[in-house]
Image: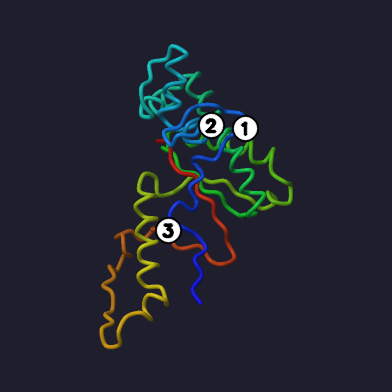
Amino acid sequence: MDALIAHGCAGDIGHIRVGDQEEPCRCGNSGGPEAVAGGAALAARLAGLGVEAASGSDVVRLVKSGNRDAVRTVREAGRAVGEVRASLVNFFNPDTVVGGAPATVHNQLLAGVREAVYRRSHPPATHVLRIEPSRTGEDAAALGAGILAIEHALSPAQVDRQPRGRLRRPSVHPEGPTGCRDAPQPASASVTHTFIGPCH
């Protein structure tokens, strides 16, 4: 018997409330990681401090140049994201948490995430935990969507639904479906991964 265990929004943690944060979000709620730690939110916070910033790209530029306000703001954003991550770490007890952010800022962002996760998570849940930056950068979403589509199309249930004699062997590029030898592979049953989406 087929069992549907998740729907399209599964895994989207950008709208889970962070502590007592009140920043409004475009989803209609307030205080979620996207509203607190997204690129637009960080730029608005820096602009309030008198720093010239209007977008996430400006935040990246400021961090790259060593602006102290920008570095501190990104680190604080990482702590906010880490508050949510800590709950997930306690619940799922993963061995790896993958964080997506522009390479220029991920060191500061993940430093804040690690600080909050290790402070708020139950010690046994972090015994072997690694919190690492994504290796796929801005292509993460496209690669993940592609892998999900391929896994769905070639799942045993989908293959069994095809009429006999009409099955065709899928065309597979020698370097993988994305043309990239380093494209991420689905996690094995013994490994649990949690992904942190990039700043918007």
Residue at left 50%, top 18%?
A: 69
Residue 189 appears at what percent x and percent y? 56, 67
Q: Looking at the image, is mark 2 or mark 3 earlier in the sequence? A: 2
Q: Looking at the image, is mark 3 or mark 1 earlier in the sequence? A: 1
Disc 2 marks a residue whose amino acid type is Gly
Q: Which mark lies nearer to you, 3 or 1?
A: 1
Say which element carries label 2: loop
Q: Are marks 2 and 1 in contact (CB under 8 Å)?
A: yes
User: How many C-alpha atoms fall within 10 Å of the one at disc 1: few (<14), some, or many (≥20)?
Assistant: few
Q: Which mark is residue 128?
A: none
Residue 173 appears at what percent x and percent y? 27, 67
Disc 1 marks a residue whose amino acid type is Gly
Hey, which quadrant is residue 185 in on the image? bottom left
Residue at left 36%, top 55%?
A: 143
Measured in 3D between alpha carbons, the distance from the residue under mark 2 to the one under mark 1, in whole angstroms, is 8 Å
Residue extending furthest bottom?
165
Q: Is residue 167 above or below residue 5?
A: below
Disc 3 marks a residue whose amino acid type is Pro
User: How many C-alpha atoms fall within 10 Å of the one at disc 2: few (<14), some, or many (≥20)?
Assistant: many
Residue 160 appears at what percent x and percent y? 38, 81
Measured in 3D between alpha carbons, the distance from the residue under mark 2 to the one under mark 3, in whole angstroms, is 31 Å
Q: Label 2, on which residue?
A: 31
Q: Looking at the image, is mark 2 or mark 1 earlier in the sequence? A: 1
Q: Is residue 193 left or right of residue 169?
A: right
Q: Is residue 118 above or below residue 129?
A: above
Measured in 3D between alpha carbons, the distance from the residue under mark 3 to the one under mark 1, in whole angstroms, is 33 Å
Q: Label 3, on which residue?
A: 184
User: How many C-alpha atoms fall within 10 Å of the one at disc 3: few (<14), some, or many (≥20)?
Assistant: few
Q: Which mark lies nearer to you, 2 or 3?
A: 2
Depth order, front residue of 150/175: 150
Q: Is residue 148 above or below residue 122?
A: below
Residue 198 appears at what percent x and percent y? 43, 40
